[in-house]
Image (cartoon, rainbow, N blue to C red):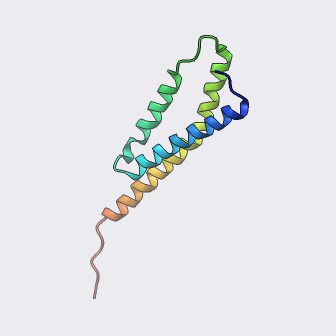
Amino acid sequence: MSSSAGETEAALVALLHLIRLMGAELVAGQHRDDVEVLVKAIETKLRAARFPADTPNQDIVRGLDLAQARLRPIFEELRARSEKAHLSDQLLLAPRPPRIH
């Protein structure tokens, strides 16, 4: 399967967008604590990807490094969203001082 650099870039952008959406759904739901589990799973599976036998090793290494570099800001965003959601949850659950009338 051969593709142009533009096609490859478009595919990469689309896949990164899907990862961002999956992570956002996770943070928005009940599994906010699982963000690190998701990050570790993606990193592990990324390194376990299988490539065609004729793919030069140097291309694989550079491609994986590029993928990790592109994922890093997404992971940072998910961690920040998760932390913000946790803080919001804590504020909602915190006891409120009684009102004085």
List x then y, in percent, for residue 37: 41, 36
Q: Quadrant of residue 71?
A: top right
In the image, residue 101 above or below residue 31: below
Position of 69 with respect to 37 (left or right) is right
Front residue of this view, candidates 99 and 2? 2
Position of 72 with respect to 35 (left or right) is right
- Quadrant housing the N terminus: top right
* Residue depicted at 68% across the width and 33% down the height: 7
Q: Quadrant of residue 66?
A: top right
**Residue most toward the front?**
1
Front residue of this view, candidates 91 and 9? 9
* Residue depicted at 42% across the width and 55% down the height: 85
Front residue of this view, candidates 97 and 16? 16
List x then y, in percent, for residue 34: 38, 41
In the image, residue 25 above or below residue 51: below
* Residue depicted at 37% across the width and 63% down the height: 91
Position of 51 with respect to 39 (left or right) is right
- Quadrant housing the C terminus: bottom left
Position of 25 with respect to 65 (left or right) is left
Q: Quadrant of residue 35?
A: top left
* Residue depicted at 56% across the width and 37% down the height: 15
